[in-house]
Image (cartoon, rainbow, N blue to C red):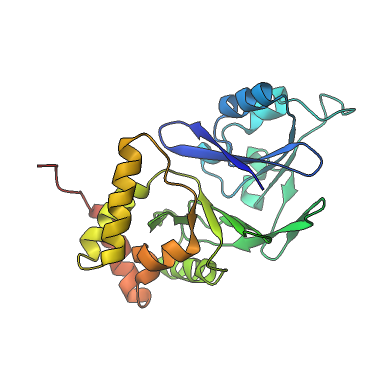
Amino acid sequence: MKIDALDAFSDNIIWAFREPSGGVVVVDPGDAAPVLAYLHDQGLWLEAVWITHHHQDHVGGLEGLQAQAPRGPGRDPLDPIRVYGPSACVLHGVNRVLEDGDELALGGPEGRTAQILAVPGHTQDHLAYFLDGAPPVLFSGDTLFAGGCGRLLEGTAEQMFESLTRLACLPPTTEVYCAHEYTLSNLRFAAHAFPQHSAIAQRLQKVIDLRSKGQRTLPSTLRHERETNPFLLAPDLEGFRRLRRDKDSFRPPAPT
């Protein structure tokens, strides 16, 4: 399964992949322009959109995509594109509401299925999409980042801790496609919080090298996250709460 990264804004990533039908699915298109350019350059059409939560940098491109994205062969150009997501996003353009436990069948020879996981914490409505197969794939939005997790903007520490615990139980080979390139700042905090943790130090250095060359650090894997993500290393809820509070106020030291 080939998954392409489309850059948006300063650090958003819109993920795009091909359905067996030949159309493209995009995840969290906060901006229509990168998606439209990608479809034009590749000579493809937009089959569906998956939304994780209602923030504008994740849903802001929906109106433009409905108006301008090419449809598949034989389809009316005005046919609505299928937009999946939580009920809180209906006002933003979701027309296929999903809930925890739902499944989306992609079909094709691989027969892959996306399982819908409710993962509140960053927002109350946040969903994640887990695709079975080899390797498994997780579109985690702003819940689980490489080396971090989302801020608690609507939900509680209890909710986020439970959501991360749920995601951490997925297979360790799961590729994690989060929605922001935050890895460097996340791992700088991780090294601050766990100064003697050699795996974190090694991963931080690798990420510094990648970013110095303008390269992405994503996707990650759940194995890496279990080993080096400070919020998955938290021993309990109180430890998580303390780490999340410290991260909110953390400012890395200036380079010397």
Tell me the residue at 37%/34% (across/down): 214
Quarter of the image with the C terminus in it: top left
> Would you say 212 lies left or right of 227 here?
left
Residue in view at x 33 percent, y 52 percent = 186
> Could you tell whether 226 is left or right of 101 in the image?
left
**Rendering quarter of residue 36:** top right
Q: Residue at x 29, y 45 (%)?
A: 208
Left or right placement of residue 73 versus residue 240 in this view: right
Q: Residue 244 or 44: which is nearer the viewer?
A: 44
**Which quadrant of the view contains residue 175?**
bottom right
Residue reaching furthest bottom?
236
Q: Residue at x 79, y 28 (%)?
A: 71
Outermost residue on the right side: it is 74
Which of 60/12 is in front?
A: 12
Q: Provide residue 41's location: percent of width, then percent of height.
A: 65, 22
Q: Nearer the viewer, residue 198 or 130?
A: 198
Q: Position of residue 128 (x, y in %)?
A: 59, 57
Viewer-closest of 1 and 65: 1
Left or right? Give the position of 43 relative to 122.
Answer: right
